Image (cartoon, helix red, strand yellow):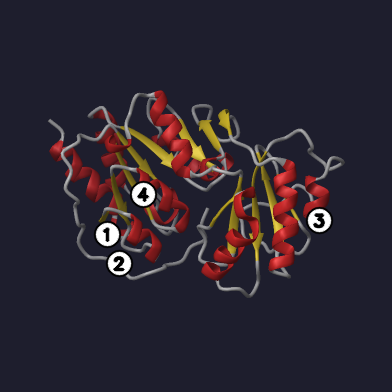
Amino acid sequence: MRENGRVTSATRQPETPASTVPPRLIATDLDGTLLRDDKSVSPRTVAALAAAEEAGIEVFFVTGRPARWMDVVSDHVHGHGLAICGNGAAVVDLHGGPGAHRFVKVRELARQNALDAVRLLRDAAPGTVYAIEQTYGFNQEPDYPKLHMEVPDILLSAEELLGPAGPLPDEPVLKILAYHPTLDPDAFLTLARLALGDRANVTRSSPSALLEISGPGVSKASTLALCCAERGISHEQVVAFGDMPNDVEMLTWAGRSYAMGNAHPDVIAAASGRTVANNEDGVAVVIERLLGEVP
């Protein structure tokens, strides 16, 4: 999940890392990566995704978005119909269309871990406010700003939302969103990781000080690795694309990885290659080259 906004200046030409392993799976982030800033998928990108699938290369969308925000790409999931949502917290079958998706795999954030994270981060960064992302529901604290494209179901404190007497005690928590109105985004991320330790996985995909907190060990990379193992696909056979810190683990894990021209510096450091910006169809540029390598 990511608000609109550029992070760094674009790189004009892609740099292709050397690799002799034919790709079997393409894993791509959405916002700031596959999607243009207006949240559209360009005709060139649509054609590149279809060509990859036709060549026998699976395409997985791997995003921080919740499943209910996947209508922007639901027409492009092809045969398998699967997407990794919530930074790895869920694998979702999108075949049913908007509002009718099916959760294939859920890697939830345990309630006690979530409550510990809220408490520790409140102490470390006073002024932090929270929203709670569950499999189907989205709830927030009254002071949490309007950052997303929806109206919350319930307004209560995070402690009340997560407690045993909360409104949806049996619905899995996928992640917590933690927002701070004044802290630098990267400084907030570092502070939270130190404060929470191994109780949760903390990352971010927004240019604002908005953190995404998932269960321990839950990330785009770890869930992608599970999906690949089920298909007999090794990490060397994966090509990944991303632009923000929540993509770093995935880009490090994949055999070939590309930072977008608009990527965060940490993403550029993690990726094995670079491509042009999302508004210049950087994912399509690389896929077209990859297809030229496929026998």
Whichever of labels 2 and 1 marks the residue nearer the N terminus, that label is: 2
Q: Nearer the viewer, residue 171 or 266?
A: 266
Whichever of labels 4 and 1 marks the residue nearer the N terminus, that label is: 4
Residue 10 disc label:
2
- Helix, strand or loop at mark 2: loop
Residue 116 location (% of width, % of height) = 73, 52
Q: How many other residues sit within 10 Å of disc 3, few (<14), some (14-19) or many (≥20)?
A: some
Residue 20 lies left or right of residue 2; in this view the side is: left
What residue is shown with label 3? 157
Q: Is residue 263 above or below residue 229?
A: below
Whichever of labels 4 and 3 marks the residue nearer the N terminus, that label is: 3
| Residue type beneath disc 1 | Val
- Helix, strand or loop at mark 1: loop
Q: Quadrant of residue 47?
A: top left
Q: Nearer the viewer, mark 4 or mark 2?
A: 4
Residue 251 disc label:
4
| Residue type beneath disc 2 | Ala
Quadrant into which the C terminus falls: top left
- Helix, strand or loop at mark 4: helix
Q: Quadrant of residue 77?
A: top left
- Estimate the spatial distance between the alpha carbons at disc 4 and disc 2, rounded to whole Å: 18 Å
Find out whether the residues at labels 4 and 2 contact each other: C-beta distance under 8 Å: no
Q: Nearer the viewer, mark 4 or mark 1?
A: 4
- Estimate the spatial distance between the alpha carbons at disc 4 and disc 1, rounded to whole Å: 16 Å
Q: Nearer the viewer, residue 78 or 236?
A: 236
Residue 217 location (% of width, % of height) = 54, 43
Q: Nearer the viewer, mark 4 or mark 3?
A: 4
| Residue type beneath disc 3 | Ser
What residue is shown with label 1? 276
